[in-house]
Image (cartoon, helix red, strand yellow):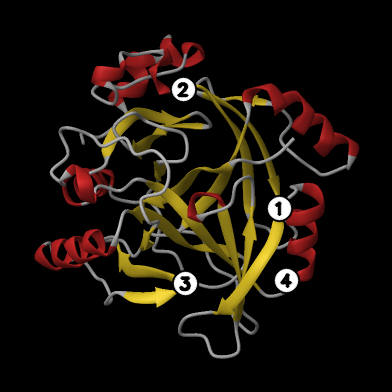
Amino acid sequence: MQLTGIHHLTAVTADAPGNHAFYTQVLGLRLVKKTVNQDDVSAYHLFYADGEASPGSDITFFDWPAMPERRGTHAISRTGLRVAGEAALGYWEARLSDHGATHRGIERRDGRLVLDAEDPEGQRLTFVDDGGAGEAHPWERSPVPAEHQIRGLGPITMSVPELRPTAIVLTQLMGMREARAYQTPGRPGSTTHVFEMGPGGPAAELHVAVEHGLEPARPGAGGVHHVAFRIPDADYAAWAERLRQLRVPSSGPVDRYYFKSLYFREPNGILFELATDGPGFAVDEPAETLGERLALPPFLEGRRAEIEAGLKPL
């Protein structure tokens, strides 16, 4: 049993139309699933990913009428977006400027070139040069040239006041390995510890920034709800049993229709999810037209008219 990387990251928006415009028209991602929060059907759940809706490429959003996030610790603080090469970072620096998006200059961090940016609601993003390693699945209808498109997620950064309790869960429960550490940008005296899973590399890293003295984050728009880690489909039952045997409070098995999930909180209160790669987003609509209509899992299909009436147009 081994985690194989980042599966997806779910964040919060209070402006679904603006969010859709930014992530598809500016960032050039594909809307691969337009559905609803299965626990709150009044809210969209929007999934943006690469051209093939690959596991590990999707950043997703719940659309809730929330106040802006108050930044702090006990939270996921930054989402990595992988691109291939220094030229791609230069492209994104210019593109973000052209669209009035908040960003900083290209810099080197943890041995890689990166470009920090924010979406219109303050969601913290980092474009990371992954050296072009691994597969890429460009979207042919993206406004971004194929060679510069976002290839997937990672690394994901979280903030905690104390490392040890979280590190125990990451290494002893989840099987990650602590690889190295670096100074947290803009936080003198703070260290960020890099934990690898599976093959490692930016698509399979969790960065844990130890930030003493910060207030806990207050969830809201522009913040992150949870991060999900990839597990092979065949290992799902074994992971559920592992959590049970170790007496880790969890959701128990949850079938999200597009993948199967297990949810639990690490000791600093951050919500983790383990998610299978399959069956994938093409289980209920053709791959060529993903995201073009409201998709509902079978147990919600009978409420389609009611649900559609409660959603705003994108």
- In this rendering, the answer to whether 32 lies above or below 182 is above
Q: Residue furthest bottom?
A: 188
Look at mark 2 in the image and give the residue it sits on.
280
**Label 2's element?**
loop
Q: Residues within 10 Å of mark 4 (few under 14, many from 20)?
A: some
Find the distance from the CA under tag 3 to the CA under tag 2: 33 Å
Find the distance from the CA under tag 1 to the CA under tag 4: 14 Å
**Label 4's element?**
loop
Q: Residues within 10 Å of mark 1 (few under 14, many from 20)?
A: many
Find the distance from the CA under tag 4 to the CA under tag 2: 34 Å
**Residue at 47% in and 46% down:** 10
**Residue at 25% in and 18% down:** 288
Look at mark 3 in the image and give the residue it sits on.
111
* Spot occupied by residue 7 in the image (x, y as percentages of width and height): 52, 40
Residue 18 seen in this snapshot: no
Q: Residues within 10 Å of mark 3 (few under 14, many from 20)?
A: few
Look at mark 1 in the image and give the residue it sits on.
176
Residue type, mark 4 in image: Leu
Residue type, mark 3 in image: Gly
Find the distance from the CA under tag 4 to the CA under tag 3: 22 Å
Look at mark 4 in the image and give the residue it sits on.
163
Which mark is nearer the camera, 4 or 3? 3
Residue type, mark 2 in image: Gly
Q: Which mark is residue 86?
A: none
Q: Which callout, 1 or 2, points at the residue further toward the start of the chain?
A: 1
Q: Residue furthest left?
A: 98
Q: Which callout, 4 or 3, points at the residue further toward the start of the chain?
A: 3
Q: Nearer the viewer, residue 310 or 24?
A: 24
Q: Which callout, 1 or 4, points at the residue further toward the start of the chain?
A: 4
